[in-house]
Structure formats: C-alpha cells, structure tokens
Image (spheres, rainbow, N blue to C red):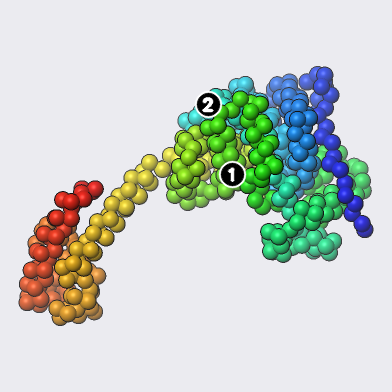
Amino acid sequence: MVYMERPPKEFDAGQPDIEPEELELKADTPVEMFFEDARVMAEAVIKAKKTLKEYLQKEPKLQKVLDTPQSSDKHAEGSRIAEHYQSILVSLELLENGFMDFDRASRGMDLEGFHEQWDATLEFINENREFMLTFAICHDLAKPDCLGIYAKDEKGLKLGFPGKRDFHKKNRDMSPKERDDWRNKYLELYEDFAMQHPDIKDDAKMQKAFFEEYGLSTTYVGHENITPENRAIIDRMCAEQGLSQEDEDLLIFSIQQHVSAYLSFEKGPADYAALVRLSREAGVDVRRAILSIQAGMLIDGIFGVRKWNDAGTGFMIATKAIKDFWQAERDYPEYEKEQAHKAAEQAILLRLRDVAAQTGLRGNDLIALGINPKLGMQKIIEVIYAAIRHDADLDRAALSAFGLTEDVIDKLAVKTDNAKEVYRELVANSNPFKV
C-alpha cells in the first residue's frame, strides 16, 4: 500500500448560529461527567468551537495541530487533538464563569482536603484569563513536530510500525518527512478502519476500537520545547492578548514545564522544591509559576483528558497528579526547614573536618596516636567533634568504652582543646550559623 501525502482534516467548528439545545453532547466528557446543566454545557462547547475557528484563521499551523492523531491509551477524548483542545476550552469557559465550583468538582474528583488549593488555582485562572487562553492554544503547538507512533502488539508491528524501544532509539534523529510519512500511514489506516466499521458512530469509541485492533500508540516526545516557528506564534498571541513581557516569560516557562510537572511529585516536596528552583533559574515569579502550572494541569491534564477505566466500559478522571502537586505544596514549608537544617549541619561538619585537619585529628593522625581503627574510628571521631562543636570536655567514658587507654585519651584531650580554640576563631570570623 502506498501512503500519499494528505492535507490536514478541516476542523469542524459547527454552525455559528446553532442553538444550544440543538447541539448533541457527549455526556461522558471530562467536565460533563459531573455537570448536569446541558444548556450551559452546550453554550460552552459552542464558544470553544468558535474560539478554535477564530484562531485557525489567524494561525494556519493550528490546523495541523488539531488534525494530529492521538491514541486512546493516552487521550481518549477522540481521534484528533481537536477534541483535546475543545475539552480544554470548554473547561476554561466553565471555570471562568463560575459554573465549576469546588463542591461540583468534588463530586468527580475527590478533592477532600484541597479546598484552599482549588480556590487559589481558580483565582489564578479568573485573574489571568488572557494568559490561560494563550496557554490553551499554544501549549501543544509542537505536537505535530514531535509526533511518534509505535506498536504495542504484533499486529501493529506486522504493518511496519516500530516497537516502543525501536521508536525511542530512532526518534531523536527522525526527519520531519519521516514523521509525516508515519502520520499519513496511521491516518490512512485509521480511516480505512472507520470505513469498515460504519456501525461505530462515536469518535472516541472508534478511536478505542482502532487501538484495540492494532495497538498503535501515539507519543509526542519533546513537545514542551519551543521552536522558533512556535515562538513566533506565541509572540503574536501574547501581543494580541495584551500580555506583558513578564507574562510571556511565565507562559514560556509554563509550556516548557507542563509535561514534566504533570508526571512529577512522586517524591512529594522534593519535586516541588525542584520546580521552585527551576522557576528561580528562569527568572519568573515563583508563586505565579506554581499557580500557572497548577491551572494548566487543571484544564489540560484533568478536564482536557479522558481515560478509559480498567474495564474499558466508561471513563475516569485522572486527578492523582494535581492532588500530589497540591500535597507537595502543603508539605513544602516543613521540607524546606528540614533541608535548611541539613544544610547547616553539613556546613558545620565540613568546618569540623577542616579544624581536625589543621589540628592533627584526622583518621590517620588518630592511628598514629596508637588508636586501632577496628575499635570504631567513626564513633571516636564523633565524640571528638561533639567536644569541639559544643566547647565541652571529651566524653572520656565513651572513649574508654571504645577501648582507648587513659594515656591515649589524655593526648586526644590536648589536641581537642587546641582544636576548640581554632573552631571558636573560625566561628567568630564567619558565624553564618548558630552553633
């Protein structure tokens, strides 16, 4: 079979004058799974379609983005990214207009204990509407440039698609033409499959059936990176939306982090600390950076995504990532105190080692005094360091328990007294820590 180059499929924006009650809705899209007001939802869907149509006219590349395929194992909203974008814009409309409050969201997301974090995230969305719209349109601009397809089972492999390991080996060096060839092959196979199954009317169910038949998984490794072409689009959108340079810098940071942040926080506050560090290195406001990524996770990674349940009979809302994020944020202040304490203790230890080197109290020096290293050299050193740090007498009983003779302990006491003087002088000259 020869796979020909194909133009992007035109996005269906719907009839601009359609009435909400005339719009056929899917009752199991992420926000609709626990949203009962069909008219409000229909109006949000119509507005989302109009928004996409508006930006398609301004930015032609968006057509290719929306036509990029997605597989049901990762994005079960429908066969193209257009469905993902529409879900994001619908959720943004509902959140911004107060139709998705904490109580309603809690019905499907089990947000117990996170009311404060929800409110802060929602406040950021409402206070930064132009920013959030620009994020929604621009965050996945690189997906068609990074599209990869690999086979998870034998049938897909027999059609010539690479396995996961082979794909990742070749992905870095894959040319744009090769990506387009794989894309065209996938789309033609999908359309042939759809023609063979006219009984499946729902796009998401067709997407699922196709995946189950061929096991072909789409991926977009590196789509968080921003190419010059996509940066130009971002620049134009930021200018149109009246965003400041500070806002644009934050937007760039949020897009660059939106993949890793969604997958992080398994280490809790340690991962949160890493994001704080990255924010500072990027020169963006840390608090706004955190909130922008949380807001992006809400509209993109939760309300913008559908996941099939394990039985494959319905959908579930994937909320673990943002709850882990919020919990990490809650645990961060205590973690920061612990890390500061550890850093202070490490600085003191380094100073003690320096003093020991200057005053003949290193391990080799102790051996020269006749101390057998098998007696527990590390414990002996800890006793010496404690005396130096706290300007106290050596714990002779402890040293005797390690098998040191009185003669050796006396020699250590003399050296330790000398070391205490050196240590006091160092502390007086620097004194960044209380000791």
Q: Nearer the viewer, residue 22 or 230?
A: 230
Residue located beneath label 2 in the image: 123
- Quadrant housing the N terminus: bottom right
Percent x, y of residue 91 = 66, 30
In this view, 31 is above or below 217: above
Mark earlier in primary sequence (1, 2): 2
Percent x, y of residue 248 = 58, 34
- The image quadrant that residue 421 belongs to is bottom left
Type of the residue with mark 2 = Glu
Q: Nearer the viewer, residue 32 or 310?
A: 32
- The image quadrant that residue 11 belongs to is top right
Mark 2 is surrounded, within 10 Å at the Cα level, by few (under 14), some (14 to 19) or many (20 or more) other residues, namely some
Type of the residue with mark 1 = Gln
Q: Can I make out residue 304 in this image? A: no
Gap in angstroms between the C-alphas marked 1 and 2: 22 Å
Mark 1 is surrounded, within 10 Å at the Cα level, by few (under 14), some (14 to 19) or many (20 or more) other residues, namely some
Residue 377 horizontal side relative to residue 6, left or right: left
Q: Can I make out residue 366 in this image? A: yes
Rendered residue at 14%/55% (across/down): 425
In this view, 349 is above or below 192: below
| Cβ atoms at labels 1 and 2 below 8 Å apart | no
Say the numbered circle drawn on residue 256. 1
What is the secondary structure assignment of the residue under circle 1? helix
Rendered residue at 16%/58% (across/down): 423
Q: Nearer the viewer, residue 428 or 345?
A: 428
Rendered residue at 9%/64% (across/down): 417
